[in-house]
Amino acid sequence: MALADFDFVLFGGSGDLSMRKLLPALYARDKHEHLPDNARIICIGRHHWSKQEFLTAVDQNAKPHVTNVDDAIWQRFCGRIQYISLDATNPATYRPLIDALRAGSELVRVFYLATPPDLFARICHNLAEVELVNANSRVVLEKPLGRDLASAKQINAEVGTVFTESQIYRIDHYLGKEAVQNLLALRFGNVLFEPLWRREWISDVQITIAEELGVGNRIEYYDNSGALRDMLQNHLLQLLCIVAMEPPTDITPDAVRDEKLKVLHALKRFDAVTLAQNVVRGQYRAGHVDGNAVPGYRQEGAPSDSRTETFVAVKAEIDTWRWAGVPFFLRTGKRMADQLAEIVVRFKSIPHSIFAQPTSSFLPNCLVIRLQPDEGLQLNLMAKTPGDRMRLKPVELELDFREQFKIPRMEAYERLLLDVLRGQLTLFMRSDELEAAWEWVEPILNYWEQEQTEPVSYAAGSWGPAAASALIGRDGLQWREEALPEL
């Protein structure tokens, strides 16, 4: 579908997210000729820069994140960019933006708020006050969308006084990953898995997002957020919803989001006992990553008494007929042994071995959906080894998206920005989804605060604290990397 002409207004245009992700994503779509000839990108910041000074910053900070730069296309892309200095909190300074935006009832206006969430409502009100919001306007809200349920509701309510729900795009870039889209295709485009996608056949589901890096220059933000707010409340819960949702009637936005909301409502709520049993909170200490010594979290600029978690593991349960009794293990952390994002659907073990091998030597069948670093699907099976003996060993059926389709891979932000420009809401959270996720997460935050609990430490370069292995071990299970046979 061809894109309509648009003005893309990027608040926080000189920030880290804009330089690392958003501008490179827009360039990639320009390179593939998805942007209309007259489309413009208006970057907003507080630096009193000229356009050329801003473009110099783009060359220095955004261009290194672009692969295979075509200099002619890069110059064309930079020609789309304008830079405006204003104070986003003060509508009296918006005159340059008013003058820069083109008129026309058919022109799409996208306001992308790559700013702290406490500015979302203020910017939206200011845009309304200076009469820049019309029927073709859209607003994109970056995470974190609040710090708790109350602040999320406040953001929803205040932004909702300016924009209708159909104009609000709450972005979660994990939902733009190719593997997540293929999970929908796998489940609802094939008859093979649907009869097995239930408690009778599935043992457990593991969802892991692990990072080798520490907090880096994000320490000020991160120490006020932590892994639960930064990753689990949004990315991990959204992935859980895609795995566990019932088949929607179609792929339209509300049909999909209605089913995801049902999953969030069906998540079993925590009480004091299950909070202590089913949640692990960790913080990395000094260790080694890829053979290099790295400091601990508190040596990287965090307060010496910081209780901010850099790791969290949770056992979740879904009270529905399909999923009752199936544990969902969610895990995320920084300074882990590897950079990895994957969903593991593990099926139950065979009930009896007819071979001269004990059932304990058979690995359960697993479907692995890899989100990063390489996107793809993997199905683990048992197969006979060559020779005259009936001896079985684990094998893998592999689908690598890059190798299979031989087309340039579209990054998550590229896909999601195109969806914003097309007015396609399927991959964006609705307000009731956001609030339902906070309702489930908030008891964990309250428990940590009330009990003044300290996170358990884990060595940088490991797979997290031993308590995370104990968490899954109580169900007689192991994290996937612990269960893999040694080669």
Image (cartoon, rainbow, N blue to C red):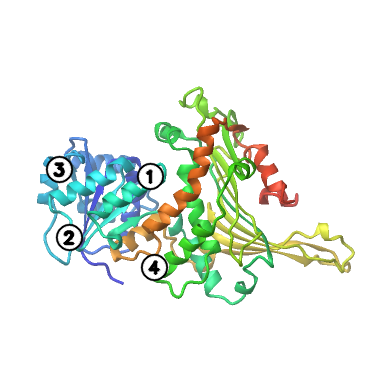
- The amino acid pointed to by label 1 is Ala
Between the residue at mark 1 and the residue at mark 3, the CA separation in whole angstroms equals: 26 Å
Checking the image for residue 150, the label placed there is 1
Of the two numbered discs 4 and 3 on the same chain, state the one appearing first in sequence: 3
- The amino acid pointed to by label 2 is Asn
**Residue depicted at 48% across the width and 66% down the height:** 406
Considering depth in this image, is 214 or 133 the residue closer to the camera? Answer: 133
Considering depth in this image, is 32 or 254 the residue closer to the camera? Answer: 254
Considering depth in this image, is 57 or 469 the residue closer to the camera? Answer: 469
> Secondary structure under badge 3?
helix
Q: Contact (CB < 8 A) between labels 3 and 2?
A: no
Question: What residue did someone put label 2 on?
Answer: 134
Relative to 309, is 66 above or below? below
Q: Within 10 angstroms of label 4, few (less than 14), some, or many (20 or more) residues?
A: some
Question: What residue did someone put label 4 on?
Answer: 254
| Residue farthest top in this picture | 304
Residue 244 location in percent, x, y?
55, 63
**Residue depicted at 43% across the width and 62% down the height:** 408
Between the residue at mark 2 and the residue at mark 1, the CA separation in whole angstroms equals: 28 Å
Labels 2, 4: front one? 4
- The amino acid pointed to by label 4 is Asp
Between the residue at mark 3 and the residue at mark 2, the CA separation in whole angstroms equals: 17 Å
Of the two numbered discs 2 and 4 on the same chain, state the one appearing first in sequence: 2
Question: What residue did someone put label 3 on?
Answer: 91
